[in-house]
Amino acid sequence: MARLVDIGTGSGCVAVTLAVEVAACDVFATDLSRGALRTAQANALEHGVEERLRLVQADLLEGLAGEWDVLCANLPYLPSARLGRLAAVDREPVMALDGGVGGMALTRRLIQSLGSCLAIGGLALLEIDEGHGAHLSALALNTITSGAVEVVHDLSRLERLLVIRRGSAHEA
């Protein structure tokens, strides 16, 4: 059975959707915020997947053992200095937006852990900010043995998604 994890799940929209759409999987979701996890739990209940979704209060993957077939994350990626100029700050908790000085603090930490937690043949999907693609791609390629990395652009042609694939054992 495939193991999927949504890191920084927030309301749980990605994790709940995975549990609804992919029957043959174990879905985990982590977040630091108890409030976010309560919202994710309510959404799981509403969609009838509460038995198939395991919610864990954790910093990234802290306390979760094993390797993941699919890992997705929409971590805070905005540079701290940009927060004051965004309307979203009025609607979202700052901890859900603030990615530190350069905006990559949490994403860098997560990528550095992928070598030990992404399964052979596994896939990581990480939402990123414009301008982060080259740096985070290089970090991922240095972290994952026989990995492949792609930066996907959104409809405005901005860097938005870092796709990391871990190669098979015979490629290492």
Image (cartoon, rainbow, N blue to C red):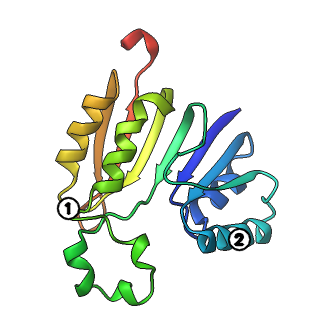
What secondary structure is marked by label 1? loop
First-in-chain label (1 vs 2): 2
Disc 1 residue type?
Gly
**In screen coordinates, is 79 left or right of 6?**
left
- Marks 1/2 in contact by CB < 8 Å: the verdict is no
Classify 28 as above or below 57: above
Task: Identify the residue position indicated by label 1 in the image.
Answer: 102
The image quadrant where one finds the C terminus is top left
Q: Residue furthest top?
A: 170
As displayed, is residue 120 above or below residue 135? Answer: above
Viewer-side label of 1, 2: 1
Residue 50, x across and y down, in percent: 79, 59
Q: Residue at x 72, y 53 (%)?
A: 53
Which one is in front, 59 or 169?
59
Amino acid at dot 2: Asn
Dot label at residue 43: 2
Residue 82 locus on image (x, y percent): 21, 77
Residue 130 percent coordinates (x, y) = 21, 62
Determine which quarter of the picture holds residue 37: bottom right
- Where does the N terminus fall, quadrant-wise? top right
